[in-house]
Amino acid sequence: MSNPMKPSGLDAEALYANLLQQVQAGLNGARNEESKQENKLCIVGIHSGGAWLAERLAQDLGMSERCGVLDVSFYRDDYAKKGLPAEVKPTHITFDVAGATVLLVDDVLYTGRTTRAAINELFDYGRPARIMLAALVDRGGRQLPVAADFVAATVQVEPCEALRLQRNDAGQFTLTIEENHA
Amino acid sequence: MSNPMKPSGLDAEALYANLLQQVQAGLNGARNEESKQENKLCIVGIHSGGAWLAERLAQDLGMSERCGVLDVSFYRDDYAKKGLPAEVKPTHITFDVAGATVLLVDDVLYTGRTTRAAINELFDYGRPARIMLAALVDRGGRQLPVAADFVAATVQVEPCEALRLQRNDAGQFTLTIEENHA
């Protein structure tokens, strides 16, 4: 968490390139392990920003047939308080995660509650051999002992602000800061 | 994980003193937060080594009335495979964890599966404002994206070996290496 960047300096495309590089190097290690343990690699993104990132990572890594999406709305521990957001996308995982090495992808790592929810949902599909976490940015403020295996940048954001990943029609990413009305 | 120590060089009492110092400094920060958020601090140890550590930390920090024990045997994701160990101690938490800052204590941080089980069990008691993790040693080999907030040492241990914390009648700790028959 040394030298956190101000979000105004964040170039989402450059961050993505950085994350891809880290994931490529890290998964090569995991693939070597895999050949020993016969684990299969797959990529699962958390709706919505993480799913976009996962999709593009899967494409760039040649793994599109083993890429899925999680919507953790029902698994969040504040579900009872917050209820469901207007738009809930169904979870879409068409492969077996039991015994697999799962690269879980999120856009922003913050309290860790979303990560916990995603891990619990994954375990309802099967028991992965390993779950690694990739996040485009880590904004600190952890409330659970969660850490990313791959993260492109740590950033400083006010508690009242939300970082939001957006994707344009050409598939390019931008990161914007919004007032948090939650 | 730089410069991992060989377990032969591990002095469990020195490690405990180091951990206590880190926790003291860290909880002072959390206590300052607490006065803002009205969260209460408590300490919960994972049976058995973590529970001994938690008990002693609570004593040294003057928090013995808010110290509990978790047995995660029923919450482990390999419960179906491993079944129950011969000795299962009941979980004992006599205070409200909802809204609390919980210092979760384990002796050895390894795959992260025990941590996940402990977090899930804690959430069945109530929704903590924050869970921080303290471990005497981190032996690497993570299978879930879990990280300790406080750890006294990172150590190198063969996969076939288990690190075991022991406590003598005088309450002194030792760390021993055993062949893992699991």
Image (cartoon, coloured by chain):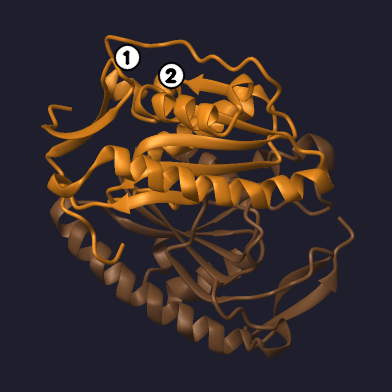
Chain colours: A brown, B orange
How far apart, in angstroms, are the residues tagged by discs 2 and 1?
A: 8 Å
Label 2: how many Cα within 10 Å (few below 14, some 14–19, many 20+): some
Vertical placement of A142 versus A56: above or below? above
Q: Which mark is residue B74?
A: 2
Q: Nearer the viewer, residue B172 or A12?
A: B172
Q: Position of residue B97 (x, y in %)?
A: 68, 27
The N terminus of chain A - image quarter: bottom right
Q: Mark 2 vs mark 1: which is more N-terminal? A: 2
The reply to whether residue B14 is in sight is yes
Q: Position of residue B113 (x, y in %)?
A: 39, 38
Which amino acid lies under the numbered mark 2 shown in the image of this protein?
A: Phe
Residue that badge 1 annotates = B84
Residue occupying the point 54% across, 14% down:
B92
User: Tag 1, which chain?
Assistant: B
Q: Position of residue B47 (x, y in %)?
A: 40, 22
Q: Is mark 2 in CB contact (under 8 Å) with mark 1?
A: yes
Whole-percent x, y for residue B132 in the image? 56, 44
